[in-house]
Amino acid sequence: MTRLILPIVAGIVLGAIVHLVAVLMLPYLAEQDAYARLSAVGSPNMVAQIDDPSALGAVLPATDPAFISAVCLYDLGEGPLKVRVPTTEDYTSVSFYTRYGMPFYAINDRSAGRSIIELDLMNAKQRAALPEDEEVTAADRLIVESPSDEGIVIIRALVRERGARDEVRARMDAATCGPAS
């Protein structure tokens, strides 16, 4: 009986390790990941609105129909980006993800406390190259450091009433994601 326990335990441990490695490698090996699906919606460093979910499906799975969504695929290879998103009356959020879908930063209109959420997005090298300016505080300039050069910015705005959908869409059209000047 004890001879049988050791191989069974070893098999279970080995199976758990293989399963864990497979699950962790899946985002890097998937061909139709979020970045690939969103590449069909818009080009890099530009904001593009995502179509509302329909009976035929959605660009992103589990999309809430009460929200208008927009996306900016970013590439920091050419320099830092400035992300500007006008807020809506109800709720607006901006979420940042790496190329492989790992979230690293999120902000909403309540925490921004402004009518426009304005951020500078850059990688570690670009952030280190910034001059130290003691007069500029975190409240004046919000800098988001990306762990990778490529990634996704998802912008969401709540539409409380159906009649306000066009107005919220117009506000989302004013969002920008482009080179910092």
Image (spheres, rainbow, N blue to C red):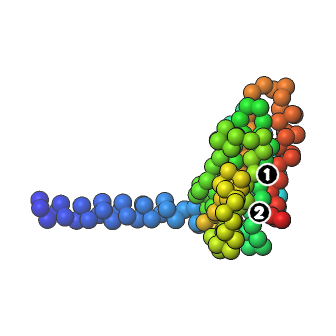
Give the residue at x 37% y 64%.
17
Q: Amino acid at mark 1?
A: Arg
- Of 112 and 179, nearer the camera is 112
19 vs 86: above or below: below
Q: Quadrant of residue 112?
A: top right
SS at mark 2? strand
Q: Quadrant of the C terminus?
A: bottom right
Q: How many marks?
A: 2
Q: Amino acid at mark 2?
A: Leu
- Quick one: label 1, few (<14), some, or many (20+) residues within 10 Å? some
Q: Quadrant of residue 103?
A: bottom right
- Of 140 and 90, nearer the camera is 140
Name the disc covering residue 142, or none. none
Examine the rendering and report whether any part of residue 144 can be seen. Answer: yes
In the image, 92: left or right of 11?
Answer: right
User: Where does label 2 land, which residue?
Assistant: 81
In the image, 123: left or right of 9?
Answer: right
In x, y percent, where is residue 119? 73, 55
In x, y percent, where is residue 135? 70, 60
In the image, 155: left or right of 164?
Answer: left
172 vs 2: above or below: above
Examine the rendering and report whether any part of residue 37 can be seen. Answer: no
Q: Quadrant of residue 134?
A: bottom right
- Of 180 and 168, nearer the camera is 180
Residue closest to the far left: 1
User: Where does label 1 land, which residue?
Assistant: 84
Q: CA distance from mark 2 to mark 1?
A: 10 Å
Give the residue at x 82% y 61%.
178
Residue closest to the far front: 135
